Image (cartoon, helix red, strand yellow):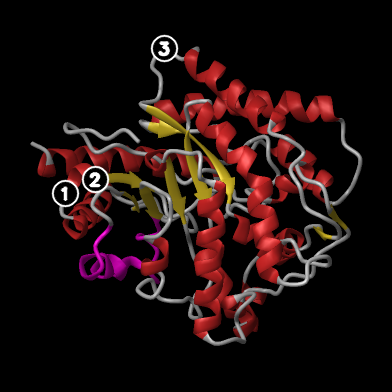
């Protein structure tokens, strides 16, 4: 991964707002309705071109395709593997269940769209890769679009889910154990991981399972059971990454990208020893939201591996407040102090802005305002830290 001695580089965590017509097609497809595949592809291509241009205009250094061609950050893999069908019955986030009045307060669409995301297919047979052609096509389309820009990104990244989030969110009606399911999904994801790296992109592993499953799948079980799951997912992911240079991988974990109480979130400290075993070169970490902004102190007590970078979340992706550039700069400075070297820090977002079609909580125009504020804050931090 590229870094800079002269400026704080900016990036984000993956998903960006999709146009309304594209959202509608993705939503229909997720419900099992027939859609015009040619129209979906056309709208996706146009949307990718738009978000590439908008990222560059906002000052993003390390960008991507905004996940426009996918209905969500992980459910698309069911189309790239054998063995999936039917419908999952995924547990609801424990903090949302604990506060029923919160769901009443939120717009009805929030609960509907959240439930839709939790009702993906499940494993009903042997899970195996159908090949990397679909992923390769995404990479080739992105490379072509970026090459046509007057000013390219400093670097590009492409996201792929961890085997743990797939196995946790797409239910298991085939494998004897969750661990066997995780291992099978890891093997099936390996071609996708390798395709992204072979096209010259940084691979971002999206792994909310490494924190969020504590208050979903493992909500009623001891912490040690959850940590054993985390350890197993890391091991399986490492095997899938065996042929990918570790310095081309960034690991994104989070506690769930939704506005909610988050009172049942697991703390960062017990997770870090497991996360640091990953075959990765960077950690993408939520550091802007009110529940985890204090955990820069944990990084001081449990330092990043010396060859890792930190993509510090300095923009909250669940609120329509636009962060002041001075706030962004302060957060970057705090992250740099925790790591000990500003050159190892990239300024990013806590998570994606549209992790599933229709599920974004930030208005589209405000997303771009936030990314412009990210660049402005990074410029301020650059003057203070790298002058």
Image quadrant containing the N terminus: top left
Image quadrant containing the C terminus: top left
Q: State the residue in front, 231 or 57.
A: 231
Question: In this figure, which residue is indicated by the disc labeled 3?
Answer: 150
Dot in front, 1 or 3: 1
Q: State the residue in front, 341 or 172.
A: 172
Q: Is residue 272 left or right of residue 42?
A: left
Q: Can residue 257 be seen here?
A: no
Task: Report, in whole angstroms, how far the alpha carbon at label 1 lies from the one at label 3.
Answer: 32 Å
Question: In this figure, which residue is indicated by the disc labeled 1?
Answer: 341
Look at the numbered disc 2 and give the secondary structure of its residue: helix
- Residue 40 figure quarter: top right
Q: State the residue in front, 383 or 173.
A: 173
Q: Which residues are magenta?
A: 285-304
Neighbours of disc 2 within 10 Å: few (<14), some (14-19), many (20+): many
Question: In this figure, which residue is indicated by the disc labeled 2?
Answer: 344
Asked whether the residues under the numbered discs 2 and 1 touch, taking CB atoms below 8 Å apart as contact, a structural biologist would say: yes
Asked whether the residues under the numbered discs 3 and 2 touch, taking CB atoms below 8 Å apart as contact, a structural biologist would say: no
Q: Can residue 68 be seen here?
A: yes
Q: Earlier in the sequence, mark 3 or mark 2?
A: 3
Task: Report, in whole angstroms, how far the alpha carbon at label 2 lies from the one at label 1.
Answer: 6 Å
């Amino acid at each position: 991964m590229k870094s800079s001695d002269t400026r704080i580089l900016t990036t984000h965590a993956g998903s960006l707002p999709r146009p309304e017509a594209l959202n509608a097609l993705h939503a229909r497809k997720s419900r099992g309705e027939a859609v015009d595949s040619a129209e979906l592809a056309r709208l996706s291509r146009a949307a990718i071109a738009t978000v590439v241009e908008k990222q560059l205009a906002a000052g993003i250094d390390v960008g991507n395709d905004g996940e426009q061609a996918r209905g969500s950050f992980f459910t698309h893999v069911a189309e790239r593997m054998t063995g999936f069908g039917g419908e999952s019955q995924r547990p609801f986030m424990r903090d949302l269940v604990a506060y029923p009045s919160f769901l009443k307060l939120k717009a009805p669409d929030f609960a509907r769209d959240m439930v839709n995301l939790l009702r993906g297919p499940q494993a009903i047979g042997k899970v195996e890769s159908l090949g990397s052609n679909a992923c390769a096509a995404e990479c080739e389309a992105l490379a072509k679009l970026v090459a046509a820009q007057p000013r390219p990104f400093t670097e590009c990244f492409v996201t792929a889910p961890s085997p743990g989030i797939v196995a946790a969110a797409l239910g298991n009606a085939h494998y004897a154990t969750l661990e066997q399911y995780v291992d099978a999904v890891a093997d099936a994801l390996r071609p996708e991981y390798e395709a992204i790296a072979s096209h010259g992109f940084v691979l971002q592993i999206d792994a909310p399972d490494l924190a969020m499953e504590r208050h979903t799948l493992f909500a009623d079980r001891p912490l040690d059971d959850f940590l054993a799951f985390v350890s197993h997912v890391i091991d399986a992911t490492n095997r899938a990454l065996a042929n990918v240079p570790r310095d081309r991988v960034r690991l994104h974990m989070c506690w769930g990208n939704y506005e909610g109480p988050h009172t049942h979130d697991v703390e960062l400290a017990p997770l870090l020893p497991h996360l640091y075993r990953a075959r990765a070169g960077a950690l993408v970490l939520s550091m802007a939201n009110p529940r985890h902004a204090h955990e820069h102190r944990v990084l001081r007590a449990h330092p990043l591996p010396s060859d890792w970078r930190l993509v510090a979340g300095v923009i909250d992706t669940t609120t329509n407040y636009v962060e002041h550039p001075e706030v962004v700069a302060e957060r970057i400075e705090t992250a740099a102090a925790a790591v000990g070297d500003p050159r190892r820090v990239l300024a990013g977002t806590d998570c994606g802005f549209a992790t599933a079609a229709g599920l974004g909580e930030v208005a589209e125009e405000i997303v771009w305002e936030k990314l412009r504020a990210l660049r402005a804050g990074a410029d301020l931090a650059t003057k203070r830290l790298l002058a």
